[in-house]
């Protein structure tokens, strides 16, 4: 019986504060919500990767600042993206990162990462709605609008 006390108890709770959260129906809606989460002082210096989590009705659950990297890249750990989606009971996600250079074209690595995340999310019935790239001058590009998702 003493060994039993060494095992952690797991509890599941779910108390979303959804009431007045915005609904995201377009890439412009997503950009408008996401851009405020990018650090204004370093958006032209360092790449950051953020994930927006949505419920089935496309209402925002929250935004997770996944990582901040260097001038030419940052790490996007797929396990953390999925773990957060499962923890928040998200049905949809929108990926986003900035390009400090101002070039809005997705790199080959951006496209490959998006595909890997989308494939992983598919296993959990989570839709990757878009991947938005933001520049320091506050313009953006939607991979969904460009037919890349």
Image: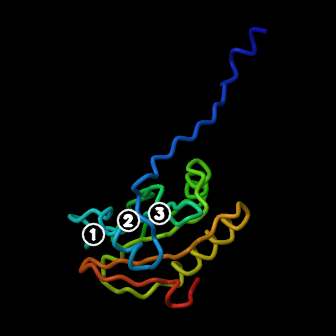
The reply to whether dot 2 and dot 1 touch (C-beta < 8 Å) is yes
In the shown orientation, is residue 65 left or right of residue 138?
A: right
Residue 94, disc = none
Residue linked to disc 2: 48
- The quadrant the N terminus occupies is top right
- Within 10 Å of disc 3 (Cα), the crowding (few <14, some 14-19, many 20+) is many
Of residues 48 and 11, which is closer to you in this image?
A: 11
Residue linked to disc 1: 43
Name the residue located 38 percent from the left edge and 60 percent from the top edge: 68
Mark whose residue sits in front, 3 or 2: 3
On screen, 112 above or below 41? below
In the rendered image, residue 119, in percent from the top left (x then y), is placed at 68, 71
Residue linked to disc 3: 52
- Within 10 Å of disc 2 (Cα), the crowding (few <14, some 14-19, many 20+) is many
> How far is mark 2 from mark 1, CA to CA?
8 Å
- Residue 40 lies in quadrant: bottom left
In the shown orientation, is residue 122 left or right of residue 147?
A: right
The reply to whether dot 3 and dot 1 touch (C-beta < 8 Å) is no
In the rendered image, residue 91, in percent from the top left (x then y), is placed at 61, 61
User: Which residue in the rendered view is the most extreme toward the left?
Assistant: 41
> How far is mark 3 from mark 1, CA to CA?
18 Å
SS at mark 3 in the image:
strand
User: Which residue in the rendered view is the most extreme toward the front?
Assistant: 19
């Amino acid at each position: 019986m003493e060994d039993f006390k060494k095992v952690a108890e797991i509890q599941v709770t779910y108390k979303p504060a959804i009431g007045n959260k915005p609904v995201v129906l377009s890439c412009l809606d997503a950009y408008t919500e996401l851009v405020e989460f990018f650090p204004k002082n370093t958006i032209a210096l360092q790449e950051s990767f953020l994930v927006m989590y949505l419920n089935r009705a496309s209402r925002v659950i929250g935004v997770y600042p996944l990582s901040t990297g260097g001038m030419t890249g940052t790490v996007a750990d797929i396990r953390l993206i999925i773990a957060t989606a499962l923890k928040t009971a998200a049905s949809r996600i929108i990926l986003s990162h900035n390009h400090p250079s101002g070039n809005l074209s997705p790199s080959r690595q951006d496209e490959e990462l998006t595909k890997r995340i989308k494939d992983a999310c598919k296993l959990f019935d989570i839709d990757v709605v878009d991947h938005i790239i933001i520049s320091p001058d506050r313009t953006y590009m939607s991979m969904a609008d460009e037919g890349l998702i």
